[in-house]
Structures are given as structure tokens and as C-alpha cells.
Image (spheres, helix red, strand yellow):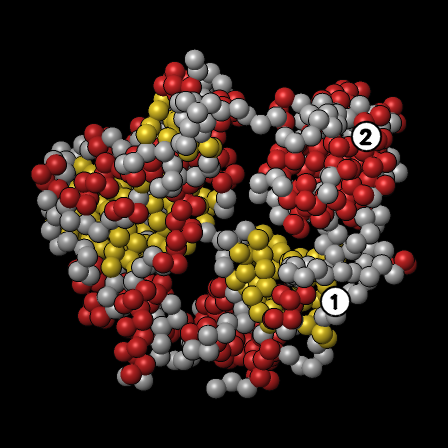
């Protein structure tokens, strides 16, 4: 339908208007542009801009159409924008306020802190929340009086909306009569979201296509237009359903407010379901803590694509009506509720270049440099291309317009290049043959059989050593508290760090003179480094960045020797003789300890006080055959009162148990501390897991 040249033209126009808004003179071009994007998304299955970008262009269209007569084929005419001027405006019994937004767990934790503050509480203990889907449709308010539906209205501006009672009555999910009187309620106002299921939307558009009618852009627009159409039969035809998510107003015949007597929001959801309304049902959860609410939001974000309705987030609300009243409102939104917005799935950008990063084992990672693009409030300008095979399989080129997505809505990655938008100026990406961090020495990159990454084999490469030092001080390795990446980079820049041993021989007097440092911070750093010197050797081995040597391998090796230098005499067969150690890691260990530079490094580290001798923590745990938990798997959840999590895991291991990290059918025992959340519920649901209190666990494992 559209030629490659037309596609390029529409794409370039879109980017221009996203930078500088379209004007009235651009109206016809903007209509045609948006029509193309709708075709690309729904018919061509190859969208060239993201959802958020389309929404911005659509808003520009609406602004222009407020001063010009809309074309009959304008995307805005797929559904009725609003009721005409003769539509009756009605005032809501209680304003329908907007919600503040959050985008991650940290935002929800901040919301929780504000709830505590505004509720005048010392801590968050006992605050319940409800979490429920944020449906992507049109908001409505329904009024029932003496059990009968007497009015339906759109949200409007929050205070007033457009009356659409006939449309509300046309929706089969909205009861014409509900027995509120059985609960003493004479008049009630309900809030809901009118939407079309994904399955129904597909059927509707298929029918429109068969009848040569213009297709709807998406379920949301089709639903909101169906609310405002003057033909209630059209509302019914669109199969619009309304989920009721709140009882906002309830009085008896004497005008007394009955909401306080219902106690909580979750109680009202259960009441509304009993009265026959379509509610979130199992989509809503009563959460005892904000952590449970956060986990529930994440659970829904992961399964949003498999749900039958379009949802763009979750809504988290303080459950108690008394607390809601205490916490209060701003002019625009309640302080006791917040929307958790799911991340934008995709957008497009220009691939303007590729840089190459060297990892701690010398792996060369290509990184795409993009024109900055917004994905769910995050500006993305760099995206990992992983390896040469990734680039080749997608035929990526410098200058390509690419589709960018956030994998797991966290890590951005490039889905594909839009080949139709190429103009011939794009350049192939040529993977380097030599170490990009050490070009002068012409160190050739190597790619081992079975591996996807090219690596620099020379560990003297400055960038590689820097990455090794960053890893060495990290929590997973030597765990030097407070010694982060920025410190390593700063000290490397100052010339104080050139290898791992230098970490234990820093010029503290000179560091103290640096801006941002003082005697106290330097002494804290020194204390952390001195503490790290006494680490067990399994941590040291892992921190050396020997290829393929992880935590488990470090512990297995540490169990076998009295001193790290003992490995100098080991053969490949010696290493392979350890259970779970394969030939690749065995060869890497032999090669590493055969390199005199590495031996010199270890000798210097030992001279500086770093422990190279097997400690008690390195020795294998001796478990007797009659230990109480032999052959059992165990998991700890919640807050333990008499010991830390690591201490409890060590006790379990000494008693013969294997510590695992997730609830599954393989779990035998769950130890539930205070504020145990979803893991406890999942374990209870399995029915096969033995659930112990902390006291019961201690009694079981201690003599």
C-alpha cells in the first residue's frame, strides 16, 4: 500500500513534528501521517514509531481540529471525540480525581513513606494496601438511587462529565438494578472503566473490515467513542464492558455517609461483586505490606500481554477508609492512591554509531549509540549489541532506524532495523579484529570454540584491568564496603591503581586531600579494606576473574587446599577430579597459575596482608548421617528475630539441608519470619511444604 519512499517521508515528518509541533497548515499532512502509522501498526505489522510518539502526534491532531473542521477520514473520526455542544453536562457526586504516577518499586516505596508521614504514623506497620489493574479505557461514573441505575456519565474534567445514561444501560455488564438497599444504601456513585476485551476488539474490527468500514485504532479509542456516541445501539454493538473499581459515594435515606461503616476499599469491592457488578475480582489483591503490593504489580506487569484486556499499569490504594480520610487529597489527586505505570514497550531511534567495551575477562561488547529516545520516562541512548552474531543476525547498520524495546521492561535492546526506511547511506558494522582498547600493540581478538564473544587475550589491557578491579572490590567478590566503581575509576585515573594488589596499598594520606574525602571517610575505607584482607580464600579465588570461575567453583577449590599457591602444582586431572569441575575451567585454572605475572600478583597481595590460607569458612561443612535436615531443601522468608539470614542458612546447611531461593515443588521446608509475604502464601497453596516458625527451626537444628 505504501512505497518505501512514502514510509521514509512519513517517518521523517513524524520526527519533525515531535521536535516542533505541527501547525494548522500541516493539518492534511498530519492526518495522512497518522493514517499511515495506523496502517503500519494494525495492517503492516511494522510500526515505525512508538505508542507514546503516536499519542503525542494524535494530541497535536486534536489541538488543530479544535480550530478546523475535521476531515471525515481523520483518525480522530474513527470514534466520536466528544458529545456535541447540546450534550448534557452533569456534576459528579464526588470529584473523580486523577492519580499520581509511579514507575518502579522505589517510587512505590516513596509513596509508602509519604503515606506514613501524611497519616501521622511512626512506621508503616499495619498499613494495608489494595492493588488492582489499571484498565486502559474510558472512565465512567454510575449513580444508583433506590436500587435503580439513574445516571451514567463520563469522567469529563473530573468534577463534571457528560451524561450517557442510555449508553450505560446498553452495556450488559452494568446492572440496571442492584440491591444496595439490603445494605442500607439509598444512593451510591460508582467509578468504573469501560473497555473492550482484546478478543472482542478483534471480532469488531473483522466485522468492520468485512463491511468496508474504517477500522478502530485500538480497544481504548473504540471504547471511549462508544461511551459518547448518541446511538446506544452502537455502544452495545461494540461489546463494551465496565469494570467497577470503586464505591465513591454511599448514603442512606437520611443522607448519612455509609462509607466509614464499610471500613475498607477491599470490603466495597467484595460488596460490589455480590451485587452483580463486574469488578477486578482476582485481579485485585489485599496486601499486608507495600512490599506485597510491589510484588503484585510486578507479577501483573509480567503477565499483562496474556491478560484478556488492555491494562497500562496497576493502582495501589490505602485500604482503610479512616486512613484515607486522614491522609487526604491534593487539588488534583488523592494522597492515598497512586498509579504504577507499566513501561513503554517499544519506540524507534536512529543508530548513529557503535562503541566497544572491554569486560573483566576481556570480552568485547559492542554498544549501539542512539539518538536519545524515551522509554517509560527513561532516556535511552546506549544499547548493548551483545556480540558479532547479534549484529549479523539483525543486519544492523550505522544510520538505520531501529526498533528499541526494554527487555523485561528494564534492559533496552534493539529488536530490528526498519529496512524500508533505508536510503542507501547506511554503513555495515565492522567488528574489530584487534583489541579496541589497545590498538597500538595490535593485539588480535580471539573467539574460542563454543563461545559467542570475541575476547582480548592480553590482561595487560588497561580497560580490562580496570573492569577486574571494579569486580574485585564488589559485593559479589571481596565485598569491600563503600569501595564502589567511582572510587576505582578515580584512583585509577590518579595513577594509584594499576593492578589488584594496589587496592591494598593505597596512599590514604593523598586520598584524604581529594575533594569529597575527609579523615573520617578515608578511615572508613581503610577499615573496610583491612577487613577484606581477612576474607576466606573462596572469595579471593572468585575475585581474581579467572574465566568461568564463579562462586561455586571458588568454594569447591577452597575446600581442597591449605594455601592458594598450592594450585601451582595442580594438573588438569587434579582439577577435574573435583566433582562438578569440567575440563574448560580446569584448563583455565592451570593456565592462570602457570602465568608468573599472576603468581607475582598473589605474592604481593600476601605481602600486603591479604589472606591466602584456608580458613574455617572455606572448609566443607561436615554433616552427619543422622543430621535432622539431611536431604531436605529449605527456604527462609520474612524477618528473623534472633539471627541474620546468612547465619540461619549456615545452620540449615550444617543440619544437612540445601538452601534454595524460590518457591517450587522441590521445596521441603519454609521458615517464615515476621512479615512473611507472598512466598508464605505460595508455600501454603502448594500444600506440600512444611512451614516452620523461626523458633521451631532453631529447636529443630540446634542440639
Residue in the picture at 56% in, 78% down: 10
Q: Is residue 425 left or right of residue 77?
A: right
Q: Residues within 10 Å of mark 1 (few under 14, many from 20)?
A: some
Q: Position of residue 515 (x, y in %)?
A: 82, 31
Question: Which label belongs to residue 605?
Answer: 2
Q: Position of residue 560 (x, y in %)?
A: 65, 31
Location of mark 1 (residue): 431
Residue furthest to the right in view is 440
SS class, disc 1: loop
Residue in the picture at 29% in, 66% down: 199
Residue 99: tell me if it is visible: no
Residue 439 vertical placement versus 514 (above, below):
below
Residue 31 vertical placement versus 226 (above, below):
below
Mark 1 → mark 2, Cα distance in angstroms: 37 Å
The image quarter containing residue 571 is top right
SS class, disc 2: helix
Q: Nearer the viewer, mark 1 or mark 2?
A: 2
Residue 161 vertical placement versus 321 (above, below):
below
Q: Is residue 602 left or right of residue 19?
A: right
Residue 630: tell me if it is visible: yes
Amino acid at each position: 500500500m505504501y512505497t518505501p519512499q512514502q514510509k521514509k517521508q512519513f517517518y521523517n515528518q513524524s520526527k519533525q513534528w515531535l521536535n516542533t509541533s505541527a501547525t494548522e497548515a500541516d493539518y492534511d499532512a498530519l492526518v495522512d501521517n497518522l493514517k499511515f502509522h495506523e496502517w503500519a501498526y494494525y495492517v503492516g505489522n511494522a510500526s515505525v514509531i512508538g505508542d507514546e510518539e503516536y499519542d503525542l502526534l494524535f494530541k497535536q491532531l486534536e489541538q488543530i481540529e479544535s480550530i478546523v473542521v475535521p476531515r471525515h477520514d481523520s483518525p480522530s473520526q474513527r470514534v466520536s471525540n466528544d458529545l456535541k455542544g447540546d450534550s448534557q453536562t452533569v456534576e459528579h457526586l464526588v470529584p473523580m480525581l486523577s492519580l499520581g504516577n509511579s514507575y518502579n518499586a522505589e517510587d512505590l516505596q516513596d509513596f509508602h513513606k509519604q503515606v506514613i508521614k501524611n497519616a501521622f504514623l511512626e512506621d508503616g506497620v499495619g498499613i494495608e494496601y489494595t492493588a488492582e489493574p489499571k484498565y486502559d479505557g474510558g472512565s465512567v461514573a454510575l449513580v444508583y438511587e433506590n436500587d435503580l441505575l439513574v445516571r451514567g456519565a463520563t469522567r469529563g474534567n473530573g468534577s463534571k462529565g457528560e451524561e450517557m445514561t442510555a449508553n450505560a444501560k446498553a452495556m450488559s455488564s452494568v446492572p440496571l438494578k442492584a440491591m444496595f438497599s439490603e445494605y442500607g444504601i439509598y444512593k451510591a456513585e460508582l467509578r468504573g472503566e469501560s473497555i473492550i476485551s482484546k478478543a472482542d476488539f478483534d471480532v469488531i474490527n473483522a466485522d468492520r473490515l468485512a463491511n468496508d468500514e474504517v477500522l478502530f485504532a485500538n480497544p481504548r479509542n473504540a471504547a471511549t467513542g462508544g461511551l459518547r456516541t448518541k446511538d446506544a445501539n452502537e455502544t452495545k454493538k461494540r461489546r463494551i464492558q465496565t469494570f467497577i473499581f470503586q464505591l465513591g459515594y454511599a448514603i442512606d435515606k437520611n443522607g448519612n455517609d455509609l462509607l466509614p461503616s464499610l471500613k475498607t476499599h477491599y470490603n466495597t469491592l467484595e460488596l460490589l461483586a455480590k451485587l452483580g457488578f463486574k469488578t477486578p475480582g482476582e485481579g485485585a489483591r489485599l496486601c499486608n505490606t507495600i512490599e506485597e503490593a510491589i510484588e503484585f504489580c510486578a507479577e501483573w506487569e509480567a503477565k499483562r500481554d496474556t491478560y484478556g484486556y488492555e491494562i497500562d499499569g496497576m493502582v495501589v490504594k490505602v485500604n482503610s477508609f479512616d486512613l484515607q480520610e486522614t491522609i487526604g487529597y491534593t487539588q488534583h489527586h488523592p494522597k492515598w492512591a497512586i498509579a504504577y505505570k507499566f513501561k513503554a514497550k517499544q519506540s524507534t531511534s536512529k543508530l548513529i554509531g557503535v562503541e566497544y567495551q572491554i569486560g573483566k575477562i576481556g570480552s568485547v561488547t559492542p554498544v549501539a549509540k542512539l539518538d536519545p529516545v524515551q522509554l517509560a520516562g527513561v532516556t535511552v541512548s546506549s544499547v548493548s549489541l551483545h556480540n558479532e552474531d547479534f549484529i549479523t543476525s539483525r543486519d544492523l547498520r550505522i544510520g538505520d532506524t531501529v526498533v528499541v524495546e526494554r527487555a523485561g521492561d528494564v534492559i533496552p535492546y534493539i529488536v530490528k532495523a526498519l529496512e524500508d526506511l533505508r536510503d542507501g547511506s547506511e554503513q555495515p558494522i565492522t567488528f574489530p579484529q584487534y583489541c579496541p582498547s589497545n590498538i597500538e600493540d595490535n593485539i588480535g581478538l580471539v573467539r574460542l570454540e563454543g563461545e559467542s564473544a570475541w575476547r582480548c587475550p592480553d590482561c595487560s589491557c588497561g580497560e580490562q584491568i580496570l573492569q577486574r578491579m571494579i569486580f574485585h572490590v564488589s559485593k559479589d567478590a571481596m565485598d569491600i564496603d563503600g569501595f564502589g566503581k567511582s572510587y576505582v575509576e578515580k584512583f585509577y585515573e590518579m595513577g594509584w591503581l594499576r593492578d589488584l594488589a594496589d587496592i591494598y596499598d593505597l596512599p590514604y594520606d593523598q586520598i584524604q586531600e581529594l575533594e569529597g574525602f575527609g579523615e573520617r571517610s578515608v578511615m572508613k575505607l581503610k577499615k573496610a579494606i583491612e577487613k577484606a584482607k581477612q576474607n576466606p580464600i573462596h572469595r579471593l579465588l572468585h575475585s581474581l576473574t579467572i574465566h568461568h570461575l564463579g562462586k561455586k567453583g571458588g568454594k569447591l577449590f577452597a575446600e581442597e587446599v591449605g594455601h592458594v599457591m598450592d594450585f601451582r602444582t595442580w594438573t588438569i586431572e587434579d582439577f577435574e577430579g573435583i566433582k562438578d569441575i569440567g575440563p574448560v575451567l580446569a584448563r583455565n585454572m592451570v593456565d592462570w597459575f602457570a602465568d608468573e605475572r599472576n603468581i607475582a600478583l598473589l605474592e604481593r597481595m600476601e605481602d600486603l596482608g591479604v589472606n591466602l590460607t584456608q580458613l574455617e569458612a572455606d572448609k566443607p561443612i561436615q554433616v552427619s548421617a543422622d543430621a535432622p535436615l539431611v536431604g531436605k531443601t529449605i527456604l527462609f522468608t520474612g524477618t528473623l528475630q534472633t539471627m541474620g539470614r546468612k547465619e540461619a542458612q549456615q545452620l540449615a546447611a550444617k543440619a544437612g539441608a540445601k538452601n534454595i531461593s524460590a518457591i517450587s515443588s522441590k521445596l521441603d521446608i519454609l521458615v517464615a519470619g515476621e512479615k512473611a509475604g507472598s512466598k508464605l502464601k505460595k508455600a501454603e497453596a502448594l500444600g506440600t511444604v512444611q512451614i516452620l516458625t523461626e523458633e521451631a527451626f532453631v529447636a529443630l537444628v540446634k542440639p
